[in-house]
Image (tube, rainbow, N blue to C red):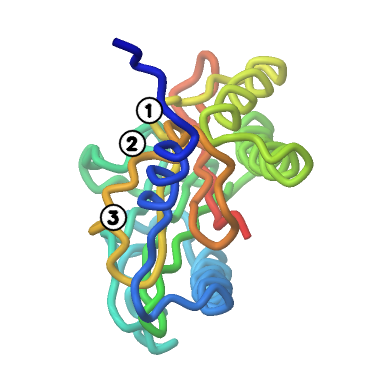
Amino acid sequence: MSTTTSPQTAQATQAAKEAVGSKYVKEQMQTARERTWQVIERVAPRVVPGMRESEAAALCKAEMEALGMDRIWHPTIVRFGENTLRMFKERSVGDPVLRANDIFFLDLGVVWGAHEGDAGATFVVGDDAEMQACAAVAKTLFDDVEQHWRKTGAAGTALYAYADERAQALGWRLNLDIKGHRVSDFPHAIYRAGDLGDFDACPNAGMWILEIQIAHPTKPFGAFYEDLLY
């Protein structure tokens, strides 16, 4: 018996993984994206040495509330120092204090106007050149992979293979356990779409988050960047 998937079955599977609810409006996904980035841009400069992760998370919450969020859809993630190596589902070790020369990232999942925003970026305080390079490479890799998607229409699986290849070429380790995910009108989780890195079709705009998490090859810190493919 043949186990080959027919084109019709593949199309149906893709459609199911990219299903949306009755409230979904693509342009509203862009609005949710912009509002989430606005929070990050307001909070990041206020995260300073001597502050704890929990205090930075409280700043994020206050800013999201001030901008009129509906709710959060995933826990607010703030990572300082060695905790930047930890994945989304892993808890931070302790509640560390940001040092004078340190690295941190913010990862926010927020609902605005019934649509899910999700964004994350890495920042450096002080003048540690390797930390600055790490943060820069995470953004460079994101931009490179995003452009590869735009130019080639590559499937999600191919995008992460490309990301791994580019990370190695730049001398960094890509965490391939972090492979992106769906977003939509809230809640996207009902569609059980799986990770972007396991999606074997070209992801449509306004539906998928591309996540990049890297680690320094020898030192105990990393960097993270994510945004909506739009």
Mark 1 or mark 2, which has the lower sequence index?
Answer: 2
Q: Quadrant of the C terminus?
A: bottom right
Amino acid of disc 2? Met
- For the point 49% across and 53% down, the residue is 208
Q: Residues within 10 Å of mark 3 (few under 14, many from 20)?
A: some
Q: Which residue is mark 1?
A: 177
Q: Secondary structure at mark 1?
A: loop
Q: Single out the mark in the foreground, 2 or 3.
A: 3
How far apart marks 1 and 2 lie (CA) works out to 8 Å
Q: Which residue is mark 2?
A: 87
Q: Nearer the viewer, residue 61 or 88?
A: 88
Q: Which residue is mark 3?
A: 191
Q: Is residue 123 left or right of residue 137?
A: left
- For the point 37% across and 58% down, the residue is 51
Q: Is the residue 204 above or below the residue 212 in the image?
A: below
How far apart marks 3 and 1 lie (CA) works out to 21 Å
Tell me residue 124's x, y (percent): 58, 47
Mark 2 or mark 3, which has the lower sequence index?
Answer: 2
Q: Single out the mark in the foreground, 3 or 1.
A: 3
Q: Quadrant of residue 127?
A: top right
